[in-house]
Amino acid sequence: MADFLDVIGQPNNAGEHTDHVSAGNISRDEIAISVDHISKVYKLYDRNRDRLKEALHIGKNIHCRQHYALDDVSFDVYKGETVGIIGTNGSGKSTILKIITGVLSPTAGNLNISGRISALLELGAGFNMEFTGIENIYLNGTMLGFSEKEIDDKLESILEFADIGDFVYQKVKTYSSGMFVRLAFAVAINIDPEILIVDEALSVGDVFFQNKCYRKFEDFKKQGKTILFVSHDLGSISKYCDRVILLEKGHKIGEGEPKEIIDMYKKVLVGQLDQISNTNKSSAASSGEKWKDSMQLNPNVDEYGSGLAEFEDYCAYDNSGTITNTIIKGEEFTVKVKIRFFERLQDPIFALSFKNMQGTEITGTNTMFEKITTGTPEAGDVYTVTFTQNMSLQGGEYLISLGCVGYREGNFTVYHRLYDVFNLTVISSKNTTGFYDMNSIVNVQKEE
C-alpha cells in the first residue's frame, strides 16, 4: 500500500488531518480506520473531596486540572495496511487503541471503523477470570457477533494455536501470564477479523509463541487484512509495518515510512527532536554540554581504576551524526570517548566491548589489537578516540564497556574502566542465528 502514502517524516501540526491519498486515487471506502481530531481529556483533582463535590454537583471552589491523554490526533489506516504506533510511555498509544476498540469514549472528535475488529489489548481485557478458557472463547466470540455454530467451527483452530492443553478447561484465573496471552491471542487472531489490533501483549509469550504470532501476522498481510500494532520492539515495527505513527505526550508528531519515523523516535528519546541540523551533533562543545548528557546512561555503572586517567565524556552516534542509544542493524555507527590524563603514560590502550543482557561478552576491540600507536600523553592532555564500525549484531539490547589500560613500570595497570556504562538497542528487520549476522550472499538456482 506504500504507493499512495505521502511520507511526512517531520513533525506536523497535530490538529491537521494528514492526507495520504495521492491524486485522489484512494476512496473513503478503502479506509478501515479514520481517526478525526480525537481528544481524550481526564480531570486530575488535588483532593478526593473535590472529585466527590463535582460528582454530587455541590460546592463552587472545586480545584482540578485537565490532562490531555490525546490532543487533536488524526490519521487514517487503509484496508490491507499494517500500521505501527510508537512513542514513549504516556504518549497516548494505549489510549488511542482503547478508543478505536470502544473500551474508552473520546472527549472530542470522530471515529469511523469499516470492518470487524478483533483486539488484543492489555492482558485480561475481555476475559472473565471466573470462566474457563473454553467459556471465554465463546464469550469473546459472542461479543464479536459470532453465533455458537460459527464459534464451534473455529474452536479447533483456536485450541491448536493456543496449545495450552487441558488448561483450557480450567478457570483462567489459574493461568500463568504465558498461557493467558496464548489463549487471548489465539481467540483474537482466529475469529477471522478484518481488522486486528495488538497492544504489546506479545512481549509476554515465549520466543517460539511470538514467532508463531508473527507468522500469523504475515499470513494476515497476505490475505489483505488490516493490522494496527503498538510495540516498543522497534525491530518488529520496522519489519512488519507499512507505515508508522509517532505519538508524544498526546500529540501526533510524525507519520510515514518506518525507518524515517524510527529515526524521529530516536531523537525524541534523547531530547533532540527540535534540532534541525545534525551537523556537529556528535560534538556538543558549542553548547557547553557533554556528549553523554544526550545518552541514556547506567545509573549504577561499575567503574574503577588507578586514577591516572579518566573518561570525561562518551557517546554513540549513528551514521547521520545523531547521538543515540539506538542503532539500525547494517548501518555504520561510532562510539566516541574523551580521556584526560593526570600523569605521563606510555602507549595507553583504549578498549571497547559489547555484552548481551545476560552478561556474556559478545565482541570488542582495542588499540593494541588494531595495532595503533597511541603515543605518550602528558599530564593534562586530553585524547579523543573514535571506534567506527558497521552494526552486524542481531537485533536486541547490548551493554557497552570502556577501558583505558596500559603497562606502567612493567606492570599491567587499569587507568580507568567503565563497565556497562550505557546500552545500545539494535533495530533489525532481519535476524539470523547466533550473536551476529554473517551477511551471507545466498543464491538459489534451479538446474535446467
Image (cartoon, rainbow, N blue to C red):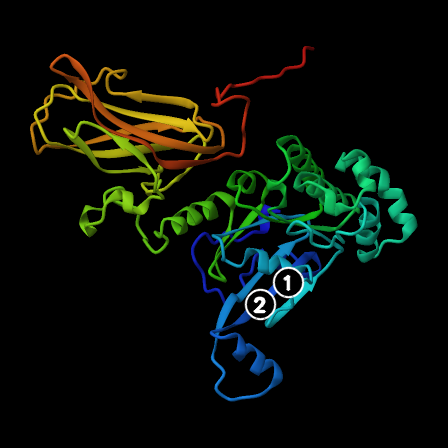
| Image mark for residue 358 | none
Q: Amino acid at mark 1?
A: Ile
Q: Position of residue 435 (x, y in %)?
A: 48, 23
Q: Is residue 91 above or below residue 437?
A: below
> Badge 2 local density, few (<14 within 10 Å), some, or many (20+)?
many
Q: Nearer the viewer, residue 93 or 48?
A: 48
Comes first in the chain, label 2 or label 1:
2
Q: Quadrant of the C terminus?
A: top right
Q: Tell me the residue that label 1 is attached to.
A: 99
**Which dot, 2 or 1, sits closer to the camera?**
1
Cβ atoms at labels 2 and 1 below 8 Å apart = yes
State how far apart marks 2 and 1 are (Cα).
Answer: 9 Å
Residue sitting at x 24%, y 16%: 368
Tell me what residue is drawn at x 84 percent, y 55 percent: 142
- 256 lies above or below 362: below
Residue 302: where, in percent of width, then height? Answer: 31, 33
* Residue under the point 58% across and 46% down: 2
Location of residue 307 in the rendering, given as x and y in whole percent from the top left corner: 16, 30
Q: Which residue is identified by label 2? A: 38
In this rendering, position of residue 286 left or right of residue 81:
left
